[in-house]
Image (cartoon, rainbow, N blue to C red):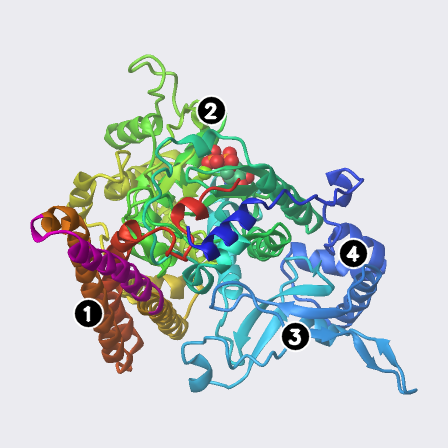
Amino acid sequence: MSQLRFTVVKEAFSHKAVEVNMPKEKPSQYFGKYVFNRKKMHEYLPKKTFDALVNAIDNKEPLDREVADSVAEGMKQWALDNGAKHYTHWFHPLTDGTAEKHDSFIEHDGKGGVLEDFTGKLLVQQEPDASSFPNGGIRNTFEARGYSAWDISSPAFILGNTLCIPTIFISYTGEALDYKMPLLRALNSVDKAATSVAQLFDPNVKHVYSYLGWEQEYFLVDELLYSARPDLMLTGRTLMGHDSAKNQQLEDHYFGSIPARVEAFMLDLEIECHKLGIPAKTRHNEVAPNQFELAPIYEETNLANDHNLLLMLLMDDVARRHNFRVLLHEKPFKGINGSGKHNNWSLGTDTGEQLFAPGKTTAANLQFITFFVNVMAAVYKHNALLKASISSATNGHRLGANEAPPAIISIFVGKQLSSILDHLETSDKDEIIDMAGKAGKTLGVYQIPDLLIDNTDRNRTSPFAFTGNRFEFRAVGSSANCASAMIALNAAVADQLNEFRAAIDKRLAAGEKFEHAVLSEVKALISFAKPIHFDGNGYSDEWKAEAARRGLDCETSVPLIFDAYLKPESIEMFKRTGVFSEVELAARNEVKWEIYTKKIQIEARVLGDLAINHVLPVATRYQSVLLDNVSKIQALFPAEKFEQLASSEMLSIEKIANHMTVIRDKVKQMVNARKVANKIENQREKAIAYHDTVFPLFDEIRYHIDKLELMIDDEMWTLPKYRELLFIR
Ligand code: ADP
Ligand code: MG
């Protein structure tokens, strides 16, 4: 091992578990400590203000300025009492992560000093200097300014010493420049649409909420090893590195105990989460070495998404305290599993019904089947769009590879429910029959057993699986903002439900009986959505061929996948649901293509630098050692012995030379491809060029670098190897 690498590795391995500052109280006592939740509102706001705010939140009504002023006063007081000195509008721009600009509470007091001030005006709306946030041209064509506005449905919180106010971020002319605004619109539209369908079954339903329970997968790497890998630091993934002799083949990590250092990190993180009101619940090892998962209890989608974004910030912070770096990249290491963020998604009424859970009564089961098949139809119609919603340069590494959902959207239904759907579709009677009991035994009309939850087989290869009372959208990337997937899914389902309700109304108006009307539409949807239903092995080549035959979207090029947003059926759907205008869709795609290009561009630069400045010099040095050896053999031994003694060294010298030549040539080719691509003005064309001409060279270059890593004297190789990066002691 090289001296430098040895020192780094030794120090990294000597890192001990960092002691966690354990609160004395129980979690229930510090949960939400730093959140301006209803309890704090009640404590800090005048009764009248409290009532007005709660009413505005619950009934989605606007808040007048007087109330806002009073809320601001109470919120400020609470923030100051908890050590906050600054406030910020916290928003989700179209880049990864979140953005904030901090302002201090201080204002002149007119007597040469300052006082703490915070008004309703500052709480409700700000104009962050947003010219450097991606906007896809919206702010050039329309109006230069953008502003952020308070989202009262997500509570303010204190992070560090700053009061954070969740906000939307929009242009002056109202176009969304963020993820939150369209998410709120999508949630609104699914609320309206699902409520109108749920009211067919229960007129008491006033609202339907969308719920999200994400499962966040991530890798941890020791910070010293991380800082010795420029590729990890700059791109979040390793651009080179030969497989470790041992990686996940023994499957010992998944079942293994959590290393003490990691457990301390997790505990610390969970405490921070709980203080910020994030209901972190589950933690475990994942399949790959150094890979872990954290999942909270599910929440209403807007809040759940804020909490996921907040978690990603917290993870980074807490990891540093434990001498770790957290990797949220979807594929940090070649040859072992990547990381996703499963999005468990469901709809539920304000009367407490879960719409994707079979019920105890005939009516409840009819309602369940109704919502179920509408989801199938929506996902089928918009399968290309849903794939686009989870696609990115980084998630592209994961999708379609053998450990991740395939790059084709399909729905896993499970055996039991499949047979119910099959029966329904073919039966000419208005009935639902349970096929789960003894073969063909009729348990009664409209019966679905409530053991579905335990009975859904766990198909890990499906990108969109029904898991008993919810759907699990597994294709979402670990670094993604869940909003992207949640916007597309909720909007698509809302649109489908509106269509369904209209069809039912028409049948009822024509005098059909309610149950007959519903079952007729349900049957039609089952037939229509058949192609999206697939319970088999999503990783198999047969499925790829079959999916293409079924007409499902099979595109694998990320820049081309984005085109789905601009297809007429997507534009129309988003327009009907009020989620995106065509201008917004076009602008956002510009941003997507631009980000794709930039990510590949950065990776190409880092790979080029490492190849030329690290790999080639080390290879040359080792080659010189071999050459030196060969000439000494030649000088010392008679010619007839030379061949025998030096042949293996000479072969190595030649191999090294060949690898070096290819690396040099391919890097040159990559630089040229970049230059050509950079001249392209059109963002879509440029992204396609990067995908088609720059990106494919990464693996070619890497292949030769990884071969050299295997050949070259371990003592000369300075970059930490996979076997060192991947196993936390
Ligand atoms: P898995 O077995 O897939 O790891 P878990 O049981 O750990 O799944 O749950 C995963 C996530 O699903 C959790 O965040 C959980 O809160 C969430 N979840 C459970 N029920 C629902 C539901 N009805 N709607 C949305 N999310 C849910
Ligand atoms: Mg899961």
Say left or right for 100 vs 416: right
The reply to whether residue 357 is visible in this rendering is no
Dot 1: few (<14), some (14–19), or many (≥20) neighbours within 10 Å? few
Relative to the observer, which residue lies in front, 260 or 662?
Answer: 662
Examine the image and state in which quarter residue 386 appears: bottom left
Examine the image and state in which quarter residue 248 appears: top left
Q: Of callouts 2 and 4, which one flags the residue occurring earlier in the amino acid sequence?
A: 4
Say left or right for 631 vs 591: left
Q: Amino acid at mark 4?
A: Met
Where residue 244 sits in the image (x, y, percent)? 35, 43
Which label number is shown at residue 125?
A: 3
Name the residue tied to disc 2: 450
Dot 3: few (<14), some (14–19), or many (≥20) neighbours within 10 Å? some
Q: Amino acid at mark 1?
A: Asp
Q: Of callouts 1 and 3, which one flags the residue occurring earlier in the amino acid sequence?
A: 3
CB atoms at circles 4 and 1 under 8 Å apart? no
Real-space Cα separation, disc 2 to disc 1, in angstroms: 63 Å
Q: Residue furthest right?
A: 111
Q: Amino acid at mark 3?
A: Gln
Q: Which residues are magenta?
A: 613-640
Examine the image and state in which quarter residue 159 appears: bottom right
Mark 3 residue element: strand
Name the residue tied to disc 4: 41
Which label number is shown at residue 665?
A: 1
CB atoms at circles 1 and 3 under 8 Å apart? no
